[in-house]
Amino acid sequence: MTHIINSSEHGTEVLRSMSDSVYKGTYCACEGFASIDAIQLDRACGKARAMVGTVHRKLAEMSGDVAIGLKHHFKLDVTAARGVGRVYQEKQIDAILSVFTKMDSDFKAGMTYVAGSLGAVGTTASMNPRVIKIHPPFFTLSPLDQATGLIHEHAHFASRLPGALNTISDRGWPFFKAYHELNPEVYRGLTTDKALKNADCYAYFARELAEPGSYTWIGD
Ligand SMILES: [Zn+2]
């Protein structure tokens, strides 16, 4: 087995026990994973990339169920906006589109995922992230949940800024993170401004638009 000896968390050099610890998949590079996991992760990356591509296209065209998704996940009602409210709303929709544009280009540039050992699905450093870390629970999820989890991490990653905190975090951290599944009440209660900065809102907006048959809104 191969493993990463030293975490890159604090900018220290990543040392590998063996040269074969990097798996080059079709969609991404996977560092430090067992090959069976790396293959799964590469597939999930392909799925997440396709979902983000679908959302990007639908959002740019404002087609399909975009209006419903915007209402559910970002509290934006495109039918109700008037006057200056409409101008603000267009800026907010542009901001969402720009996150999906960035995610799309990150996927196309080729991501690197690094094996971690936490109890979370994935983690992304809140400052200057260079990679996304994927942890053991990820491999217990369904392919769709894996792709959704990746989009969540990619939303953090896409909001990176040089020398500053990522603009997209997990709202309500550390006590009541606005997670769609674990904290639906908090999730539903987010204002538009908070939703725009909450990673799960991008992940589940993507899930509703790209995989409508598998998604049920958690509210009325
Ligand atoms: Zn997160």
Image: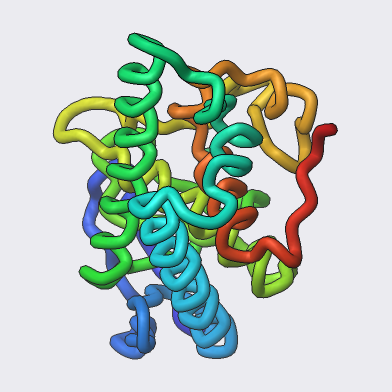
Residue 7 shows up from this direction: no
Please provide percent x and percent y for residue 43.
Answer: 52, 82
Q: In screen coordinates, is 116 left or right of 72?
A: left
Q: In screen coordinates, is 152 left or right of 103?
A: right
In the picture shown, does residue 218 fall above or below 110?
above
Residue at 80% across, 39% down: 218
In the picture shown, does residue 52 fall above or below 171?
below
Closest to the observer: 220 or 163?
220
Please provide percent x and percent y for residue 156.
Answer: 40, 42
Q: How many marks?
A: 0
Residue at 38% across, 38% down: 96
The quarter of the picture where the C terminus appears is top right
Query: Residue lying farthest top?
Result: 84
Closest to the observer: 155 or 31?
155
Residue at 42% across, 69% down: 49
In the picture shown, does residue 78 fall above or below 14?
above
Query: Residue lying farthest left?
Result: 162
Residue at 38% across, 87% down: 25
Q: In screen coordinates, is 140 left or right of 15?
A: right
Please provide percent x and percent y for residue 19.
Answer: 29, 87
Residue 141 shows up from this direction: yes
